[in-house]
Image (cartoon, helix red, strand yellow):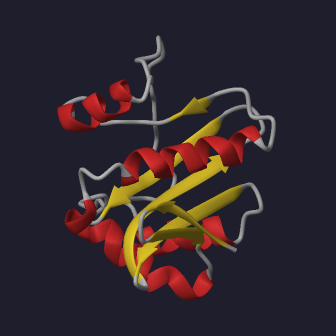
Amino acid sequence: MSISILPQIMLREAGPDDAAAVIGLWHAAGLTRPWNDPASDYTLAMDNPAACVFLAQMDGEPAGTIMVGYDGHRGWVYYLGVSPAFQRRGLGRALMHEAEAWLAARACPKLMLMVRHDNLATKAFYAALGYEPQAVETLGRRLDGR
């Protein structure tokens, strides 16, 4: 099912056949990092009923994407990206709204996301949507040998 979220932009859940388009948009939006394999991330989301990737399209071309998941305790957002040609039109806000609605439909009490400390533009975007820094520190450890 597709819904219109902005004039001429349709939003739907992405499927396995959308991998190349979604991952291409992630690269174009600067969301990928050498230590993360976006293809594996995409496949894991497709195979997990507690995750969803939304794809926004205009005339069949990818315009934006967001990955959302619910671990049973908190909701998480990853890979919010808007194609450079569609930035500053409200698409990122609309994608976040859709992710929030997806989580709310699952009775998720809180949405969390991670932003690199020096990514000031992204911090400003989320602040404008009402997101606030949390009194937590993220710790991590690689388990894949990288």
Residue lying farthest to the top in this orientation: 135
**Do we see residue 8 in this rendering?**
yes
Q: Point out the image quarter for the N terminus.
A: bottom right
Residue 78: give x, y in percent of width and height.
47, 50
Tell me where residue 21 sits by quadrant. bottom left
Tell me where residue 47 sits by quadrant. bottom right
Q: Point out the image quarter for the C terminus.
A: bottom left
**Do we see residue 35 in this rendering?**
no
- For the point 41% across and 53% down, the residue is 80
Question: Horizontally, is 16 left or right of 140 in the view?
Answer: right
Question: Horizontally, is 62 left or right of 86 in the view?
Answer: right
Residue lying farthest to the front in this orientation: 7
Instruction: Examine the rendered structure and indicate whether residue 18 appears above or below residue 69.
Output: below
Residue 110: give x, y in percent of width and height.
65, 27
Residue 5: give x, y in percent of width and height.
51, 59
Observer-nearest of 53 and 143: 53
Observer-nearest of 52 and 37: 52
Instruction: Examine the rendered structure and indicate whether residue 76 appears above or below residue 146.
Output: above
- For the point 54% across and 32% down, the residue is 112
Tell me where residue 13 sits by quadrant. bottom right
Residue 56: give x, y in percent of width and height.
47, 68
